[in-house]
Image: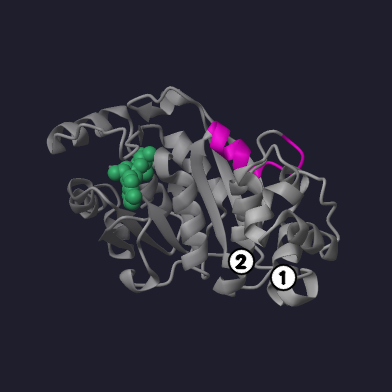
């Protein structure tokens, strides 16, 4: 039997039973629309071979839909009240799927592979909005087994994540997300499907992991340091924005030229490949070869 999904009256009843007062701090906006969760699951393209990591299952709206499609769901929820109720909700609404759910009460920003009972293959989540980008990027870094991610975030964050070089909204999240793979917008979600209703529209973003720069954490750290430095002063040219990262404007210029990047360009025009090249050049350069004493 396919899972029954939660509509407005079920969400109201569950919230009343648990005496839930949704907090902004935890980004608690619960979806009460079955079509929306079906759409998210369809966009995620997960199948019965997937172990889905769901961050912030809340009252279980998306969890129930995921259990109908994925092989297994591991749900990480920070709010103990919600985490404790979830297995019961699944037993009531999707009894055939109850054995395929694990709930871990934890902060998704701190969760490590050893905290989960099984390695997840796909991240699917309606993310808490105020920590959406760090949660997404941290999980892609810590869980190399995630081959795909489909997340719902604020529309403007979705735009920023999927932005390509050159635009005003292109920035650190856009470049870092592309370090892991291909990033695309996967649709928009209106405000009315949530309780309580947020002030802003939401959007879906998809990352298809390619790992084309490898999985070495040290390589990632170096590359991300160059990205952070370039965008910390995004109105400046790369030569001056990277001065303290490199040691001096002159050294920044040398490294940029060695990486085949125009020192007068701004970071917002560079693709992730450029930052990878720059960080690689900086890592292999002997400072003595570059700086005149
Ligand atoms: N998935 C549910 C839905 O679609 O109705 C709820 C989504 S709601 C936007 C975000 C959920 O994330 C809430 O249940 C909240 O308690 C939880 N949450 C907030 N911060 C978290 C964190 N750092 N780690 C894990 N869960 C978190």
Res 206 seen here: yes
Task: Find disc 1 in the rendering and name its residue.
Answer: 280
Range shown magenta: 155-167
Q: Judge by depth and name the residue closer to the eye, 97 or 86.
A: 86
Say which element carries label 1.
helix
Identify the residue at horizontal 44%, vertical 60% (top origin). 52
- Answer with mark 1 or mark 2, whichever residue precedes in sequence: 2
Ligand 1 image-quadrant field = top left
Circle 1: is it few (<14), some (14-19), or many (20+) Cα within 10 Å? some
Is residue 180 rendered magenta in the image?
no
Circle 2: is it few (<14), some (14-19), or many (20+) Cα within 10 Å? some
Identify the residue at horizontal 77%, vertical 57% (top origin). 250
Is residue 160 rendered magenta in the image?
yes
Q: Position of residue 286 (x, y in %)?
A: 73, 77
Q: Residue furthest front?
A: 293
Q: Judge by depth and name the residue closer to the eye, 117 or 271.
A: 271
Task: Find disc 2 in the rendering and name its residue.
Answer: 222
Task: Describe residue 209's horizontal placement relative to residue 273 as left or right.
Answer: left
Q: Judge by depth and name the residue closer to the eye, 121 or 154.
A: 154
Disc 1 to disc 2, C-alpha distance: 8 Å
CB under 8 Å between discs 1 and 2: yes
- Quarter containing the C terminus: bottom right
């Amino acid at each position: 039997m396919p899972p029954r999904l939660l509509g407005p009256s079920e969400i109201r009843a569950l919230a009343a039973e648990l005496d839930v007062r949704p907090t902004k701090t935890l980004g608690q906006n619960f979806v009460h629309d079955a079509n929306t969760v079906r759409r998210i699951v369809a966009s995620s393209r997960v199948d019965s071979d997937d172990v889905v990591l769901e961050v912030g299952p809340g009252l279980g709206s998306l969890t129930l839909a995921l259990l109908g499609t994925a092989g297994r769901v591991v749900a990480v929820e920070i709010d103990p009240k919600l985490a404790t109720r979830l297995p019961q909700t699944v037993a009531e609404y999707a009894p055939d799927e109850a054995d395929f759910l694990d709930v871990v009460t934890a902060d998704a920003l701190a969760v490590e592979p050893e905290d989960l009972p099984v390695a997840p293959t796909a991240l699917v989540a309606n993310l808490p909005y105020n920590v959406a980008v760090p949660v997404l990027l941290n999980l892609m870094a810590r869980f190399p087994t995630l081959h795909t991610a489909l997340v719902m975030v604020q529309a403007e964050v979705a735009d920023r994540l999927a932005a390509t070089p050159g635009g005003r909204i292109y920035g650190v999240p856009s470049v870092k997300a592309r370090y892991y793979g291909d990033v695309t917008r996967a649709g928009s979600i209106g405000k009315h499907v949530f309780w309580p209703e947020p002030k802003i529209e939401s959007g879906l973003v998809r990352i298809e992991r390619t790992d084309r720069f490898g999985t070495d954490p040290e390589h990632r750290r170096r590359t991300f340091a160059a990205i952070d430095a370039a965008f910390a002063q995004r109105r400046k040219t790369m030569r001056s924005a990277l001065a303290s990262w490199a040691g001096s404007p002159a050294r920044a210029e040398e490294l940029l030229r060695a990486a085949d990047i125009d020192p007068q360009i701004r970071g917002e025009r560079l693709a992730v490949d450029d930052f990878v090249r720059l960080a690689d050049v900086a890592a292999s350069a002997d400072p003595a070869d570059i700086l005149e004493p």
